Amino acid sequence: MATRIDLDGLQELVAGGAQLVEVLPRGEYVEEHLPGAINLPLKELDAATTRQLDHSRPIIVYCWDGL
Amino acid sequence: MSPRAACRLQTLGFTDVYDYVLGKADWLAHGLPTEGEHADVPRAKDVLRDDVVTAQLDEPIGAVRERVARSPYGFAFVLAGDGTLLGRLRKATLDGDADAAAQDVMDPGPSTVRADSKLEKLAARMRQHNLDAMVVTTPQGRLLGVVRRDDAERRLDEADAPGL
């Protein structure tokens, strides 16, 4: 299970070089997203789409409210 | 959704995965910057003022009254030690017994809005209820500041002005 973090944890990880991934559908990402986040919708998560992610850096995923 | 995404990434071989469980709703409600097509929609955070007077729970209101008199507001907010908004001291209350502790005379649980609330809706609500200001807190209830109606209306006028 992934480590659950709050806002403070997120900001600390991002300052250290973590990658931010919004997993909401593309339309919601286009409307508004966290600075620097990329969009990988949950329904599209697979080996091919995640190739752009760096294995050596932490990854933070988020949606609207975790549900 | 994000727990499933985090799990999927782990099954794909990523080992250092974190889940920001409170998500975009939490980020926006803290008034933090965003990117995207809606990032420029006027919101409470754009006209937030943090110059409102605050008081501690056990503070005598006589001392609070003096600070309020030097401020542009006629009220003060009562905060817990961690900044959580617990009450409001109205002008009439501040004019009462100077030795009374703030927590004994405050109006508890003032209504609040989030920093990402759309300014257009807030301004309409303030007009409808004849409010001069609305209180903005984080989702955890910590005071961020106030949105004044005149500031909100000015900001909306600027957003509507051609060429801006």
Image (cartoon, coloured by chain):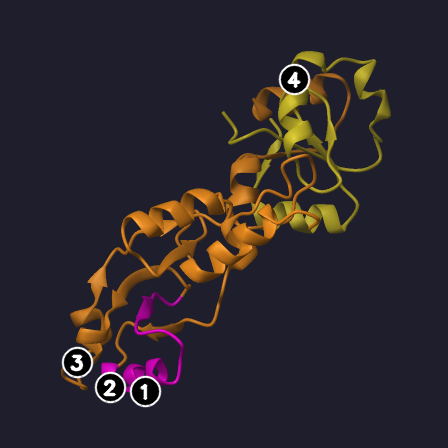
Chain colours: A yellow, B orange
Q: Position of residue B2 (x, y in %)?
A: 59, 26
**B140 on left or right of A2:** left
Q: Decide: marks 1, 2 in contact (CB < 8 A)?
A: yes
The answer to whether residue A26 is visible is yes
Disc 1/disc 2 C-alpha distance (Å): 7 Å
Disc 4/disc 2 C-alpha distance (Å): 56 Å
Q: Find residue A46 and report its image quarter.
A: top right
Q: Amino acid at mark 1?
A: Glu
- Earlier in the chain: of badge 3 and badge 2, it is 2
* Residue at figure coordinates x 31%, y 74% from the top left: B74
Task: Answer above or below: position of B123 versus B108.
Answer: above
**Badge 4: how crowded within 10 Å, few (<14), some, or many (20+)?**
some
* B6 vs B90, nearest the viewer: B90
* Residue at figure coordinates x 34%, y 65% from the top left: B80
Are dots 3 and 4 on a single chain?
A: no
Q: Which residue is mark 4?
A: A42
Q: Please state the chain letter of the residue tagged with numbered disc 3 in the rendered image.
A: B
Q: Which residue is mark 2?
A: B62
**Badge 1: how crowded within 10 Å, few (<14), some, or many (20+)?**
few
* Residue at figure coordinates x 83%, y 13% from the top left: A48
* Residue at figure coordinates x 54%, y 34% from the top left: B21
Q: Which residue is mark 1?
A: B66
Between marks 1 and 2 in the image, the one whose residue lies nearer the viewer: 1
Are dots 3 and 1 on a single chain?
A: yes
Between marks 3 and 2 in the image, the one whose residue lies nearer the viewer: 2
Between marks 1 and 4 in the image, the one whose residue lies nearer the viewer: 1
Q: Which residue is mark 3?
A: B100
Task: Answer above or below: position of B133 versus B78.
Answer: above
Q: Residue B65: say if magenta.
A: yes
Q: Amino acid at mark 3?
A: Ala
Residue range of the region highlighted in magenta in the rendering: B60-81
Q: Residue B18: say if magenta.
A: no
